[in-house]
Amino acid sequence: MPRCTLYIVFLLLIPILSLSQGLKFSAGHEPIDKRTSYELFNKKDISFEKQFTLAFELSIYSSNSLGNIFRVKNKDNNTIYNLFYDEEGENCIFRLNEEGKTSLIIAKINQQRLFKEEWINIQLTFDLEEQAFKLKIQDQTYESPRVKLPQVYTPRIIFGKSDYLIDVPMMSIKNVRIGNATHQYFFPLKENAGGIVHDEDGNAYGSVSNPTWLILDSYKWKNIFSNSSPSQAGSCYNQRTKEIYYFNQDSITIYNIKTNQTNKLAFQNPCPVKLVLGNNFIDSATNKLYVYELFYTQSYFGPTVASLDLESYKWTVESSDLIKKELNHHGSFYDERNRRFYIFGGYGNMTYSDEFRRYDVDSNKWQTVQGWSGDKIFPRYFLTAGKGTEDHTAYIFGGMGNESGEHIVGRKYLYDFYQINLNSKKIIKKWDIMWKDKHIVPARGLVFPDEAHFYALCYPEYLTKSHIQLYRFSIQDGSFAIVGDSIPIYSDKISTHAQLYMDKQLGRLLVLVQESKDDIQSTLKVYSLNMTPITLTELNSFPRYGSQRKVFLCLMVLGIFGLSTYFIWRQKRGKRQLTNLLEETAVITNPIVVTAQLPQKNDSVRPNAIFLFGEFRAFDRNKRDVSYLFSTKLKQAFCLILSHRWGISSPYFSQMMWPDKSEDKVKNSRGVTINHLRKVLSEFTGIELVHKKGRFIIETTEEFYCDYVACTQLMDDPSYINESRLTQIIQRGKFLQGLDHPVFDTLKTEVEQNLLPILLSKLQQADLAHQHKKSIALAHAILLLDPLNEQAIFSQVKAMFALHQQEDARIKFQQFCHNYKQLMNEDFPYQLDKII
C-alpha cells in the first residue's frame, strides 16, 4: 500500500480512536494566569518537508465562547499562524489568520449542523509545495490563497493561551495528530495528572499549564444536577432533546445537559394520573413522555396511563386500564419500532412475578404476553432489562426471587442473563454467574455500547446507605469488570431508584438517582460519566513506556538513597528491628523513599494508636511514630478490612484492591500484602489481622485505639452520643485527609454522610439551649467535613457574637465567603450583618 494511502487511512481513523481521554482548557472565565496553555514540540525540534497535517478532535462546551484554539510558530522565521474561534448569531466562525496581517480562511458553519456530535474533527494541512493551507472542519473543506511557506517547516504548536493571545474558548481537545507520509506523531492526551504531555509510546514531546485531564471524567461520576419535589414524582432522560425531566402532579423541571440550563414549568392542567411511583417511558418518535401506574392500595377509578407532549407540555389521558397487581421493582424496556412497552417481573402480595406484560401505545391497552418458548425465567424482582442493538432483541439480567414465586419460600439472588426475541418469542439463557462476593442487585436500565458488552448499575439493596457501582459485562460469557467510581444512594424506600442511560451521540453515561425517605417527598441527583468508562488500573496506566522508565529510574535512585540513610539510622535502634525491616522491604517490589514523620503539635500521641482523621498517623506500643511503615497499598488494605466490621471475603478484598485482575492472578499479591500488613500491625499491642471462615477481619482490644473505630462506636447510638468526644476526633481534620486514591472515596463519603446529620442535629440542640461554646465546637467540626455548610457558619458566627468574639466571627465569616467564592464561582448570598 503506498505511503500516501496509508496516511489517508491514518487520518480517517481519528474518530475510531476516540477513547476516554482529552484535555479541557480553563478559559476566559478564569484569571489569566489560570488559563490553559498546551505547547507541542517545545522539548524537541521536529521538521517536515513537502506537507504535513495537524489533526485533532475539538469540543466547544459553552455558547458565547471565543478565543485562540491554536498558534503555529516556525522555528526558522517570525511568521505565525493561528486558528481563532468566534460565534456570530447561529454560526460558528473559524478564522485561520496570518497573525498581524490577514485572515486566510473564514469558515462560517451553522451551530446546529456543526454540533450534532459533541466532538468535531479539525484538520489543517500545510501544503509546502503548493504554498497554501487546507482547513477541514467535519466534512467541509476550505482552501487559502497562496502564501509564502518554507520548504522545510519546524513547527511549535501552542493550543490555548499563548503569549499575548490570552482569550481561550471553552474547549477540550483530544487525539492530536501531526505528520505526513514520512513521520507521524500521535498524542492521545491520556494523562491523568501533571503537566508533561506524552505521545502514544510514553515519550515526552510537550507540556501544559493549568490542565484538566478528561480521563478523570471517565472514572469519576460528576454530579451535574440536583432538585427536589415535595410530592410523588418521576424522572427520565430524553436522548432526542438532551433533557432530564423531573415531574410531579403539578409541574416539571427540565435540565438540558448540553446547555446546563434549567427550566421549571407549571402544568396548565395537572397530571391526570394519580402518581405513586411515577413509572414512565419516552416515545421519541412523537416526543411524548408516558407515565403509568399499575396498582393503588386504595380504591381508584381514574386514568392509569397519560402522555405529556414535550413541546406543549399538555397532558392527555391514554388509558384507564389497571393491572391491579402490585409489581414493585419490575424490569422494563420500550420497543420503539412497534410502539410497545414491556414489563417483566416485580413483587407484590408476597409473590414474585414471571409474566411479561406490555402496553400498546396505539391501542392504549395492557395485555399479558403469552406463548414464550425456550428457557424459563424464574419469578423475580429487582431485575433490570433493556433493548439490545437489534430491533427485535431485548435482554433481562439478575434480580431476586425463586423458582416457585412464593416469597415465603425465601428469596435467592440471581446473576443470570437472558436474550429475548420479541418476534419469535423465544428466550435463550446466555449465562449464570456463580457470585462469590457480597450480594448485589441491578438498578434500572441496561445499555449496550456495542454488540459484545452491556453496562449495568449494581448495589446492595439491603443497606439503607449504600453505593451504586457500574459493571461492564460480556454478553457472551458474563465476565465483568468494575468501571468508574461509586455513587451514594439512600435505598430504604420503594420509590427510591436509580436508572442508567447512555447517550452515544454525546459520548456519556447518565445516572438518575431518585431518593425518598417517606415515599412522598423525593430528591433527584443526576450524574454523568464520559464514555468509555475505565477501571482504576486504566486510569493510572498512562504513560506506559519512555516516561515510566525515567520515573522508575529516578524513584530507584531516590529509593536506594532513602533506604540506605534509613538503614543507618535504624541500625542504632537494635539488630532485631533492622532484621524486621529487611524482611518487610523484601516483599516490596518497587523502591520507596521512607521518611520518618514528626508529630505535629495538635496530634494526640498515645501508644498503640492509629489515627485516620486528619493526617494518617500511627504510634506503636512504645509511642514511636511508625506511620512510614504504611505504604499507600497497606493503608488501602488496612482501611478496607477495618471498615468491614464482620470481615471481608478474599474475593471481594481482591476485587477492591486489584479490580482488573482475576482471582487466580491476584493470589500472590494478596498474600504479600496481607503478610506485610500483619508484620506492621505486630508493632502494636491489642490489634490482630486474622482469617476466619474465609474472611479477613481486624480484631482489637481496649489496649488499641483507632479514632475511626471510636467514631463508629459513638455513632451506633446517636441518641446517646457524646458530641464532645466526637468533635474531638474530628478536630484532627477530614477523614483520610490527603489520601486521594479512588479506593478511599466510598469510605470517605460514607463516614461523612453518617456524621453530618448527627452533628447538625446536635448543633441545633446546642443553639436552642444557648450553649454557645458547644455550638462553636460543633460548627467547626461540621465545616471541616462540609466547608460550605450554611447552617454551621450561621450558628458559629452567632455564637461567637454572643460570646463577644466579634472580630473572630468576622474573620471566620470572611474565610467562609472566600471558600464559597472559590468553590462555587459566585458570591455567598448572605451578609454578616443580616445573619446576626
Image (spheres, grey):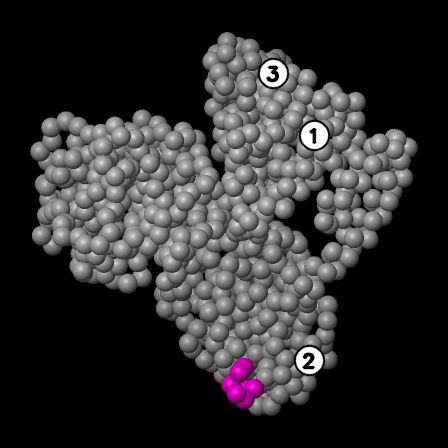
Mark seen at residue 825: none
Residue at horizontal 46 percent and vertical 39 percent from the top: 437
Question: Disc 2 or disc 3, which is closer to the eye?
Answer: 3
Q: CA distance from mark 1 to mark 2?
A: 58 Å
Marks 1 and 2, the one that precedes in the sequence: 2
Residue at horizontal 13 percent and vertical 35 percent from the top: 324
Secondary structure under tag 2 reads loop
Q: Residues within 10 Å of mark 3 (few under 14, many from 20)?
A: few
Q: Is residue 708 toward the left or the right of residue 381 in the image?
A: right
Asked if residue 397 lies in the magenta stretch, the reply is: no
Question: Disc 1 or disc 3, which is closer to the eye?
Answer: 1
Q: Residues within 10 Å of mark 1 (few under 14, many from 20)?
A: some
Residue at the bottom extreme of this rendering: 129
Amino acid found under the numbered disc labelled 3: Arg
Across and down, in percent, residue 462 comes to 38, 31
Which residue is denoted by mark 1 in the rendering? 681
Across and down, in percent, residue 287 comes to 23, 55
Q: For the magenta stretch, what is the residue range?
A: 1-7
Marks 1 and 3, the one that precedes in the sequence: 1
Mark seen at residue 47: 2
Residue 544 versus residue 604: which sits nearer the camera? 544
Q: Residues within 10 Å of mark 2 (few under 14, many from 20)?
A: some
Which residue is denoted by mark 3 in the rendering? 725
Amino acid found under the numbered disc labelled 2: Ser
- Total numbered badges shown on the rendered structure: 3
